[in-house]
Amino acid sequence: MSGGIMAKKRSIGGFKSNRKNKSLDVQQSLISIIVDIHNTPILRQSATQKLLALNRKHRLEMPKYIGVMICKKCQILYNSKNSSTRIKHGQIIKTCHVCQDVRRLGGGPKHHRG
């Protein structure tokens, strides 16, 4: 080639997996901000909102241990001031004081099984 511009090599199939890997890295960094209790509540709540938006955009699965920390209705991060947690008949019952939503985790009593 004499002085011509070289054509750009096209990547085949690498863009999607690269994008997913980058979004998984960002997800892990946001989770580390949320889990660290030494961060300010405003920073943790902002990271929660960004994490939910990232998961919706890239269709990522929310890890279970993070999903139980977030109210499904108003998307606020649970803490001892804005929620209450009770255990009744083998179920964990979380009540959000912001939106009054009640979440029941666990199957409850298994007395009906033989």
Image: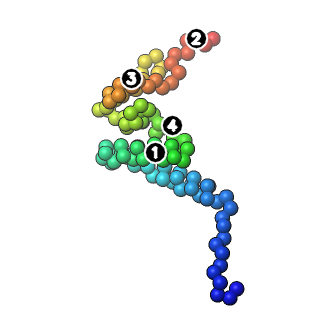
Q: Amino acid at mark 3?
A: Arg
Task: Residue under label 2, please give it.
Answer: 112
Q: Amino acid at mark 2?
A: His
In the picture provided, is 20 more to the left or to the right than 80? Answer: right
Q: Nearer the viewer, residue 114 or 107?
A: 107
Q: CA distance from mark 2 to mark 3?
A: 23 Å
Q: Is residue 38 visible?
A: no
Considering the image in quadrants, where does the N terminus appear?
Answer: bottom right
Mark with earlier residue (4, 2)? 4
Q: Which numbered disc, 3 or 1, marks the residue closer to the eye?
A: 1
In the picture provided, is 72 more to the left or to the right than 97? Answer: right
Q: Which mark is residue 64?
A: 4
Q: Nearer the viewer, residue 97 or 68?
A: 97
Q: Amino acid at mark 4?
A: Lys
Q: Which numbered disc, 1 or 4, marks the residue closer to the eye?
A: 1
Mark 4–mark 2 CB contact (< 8 Å)? no
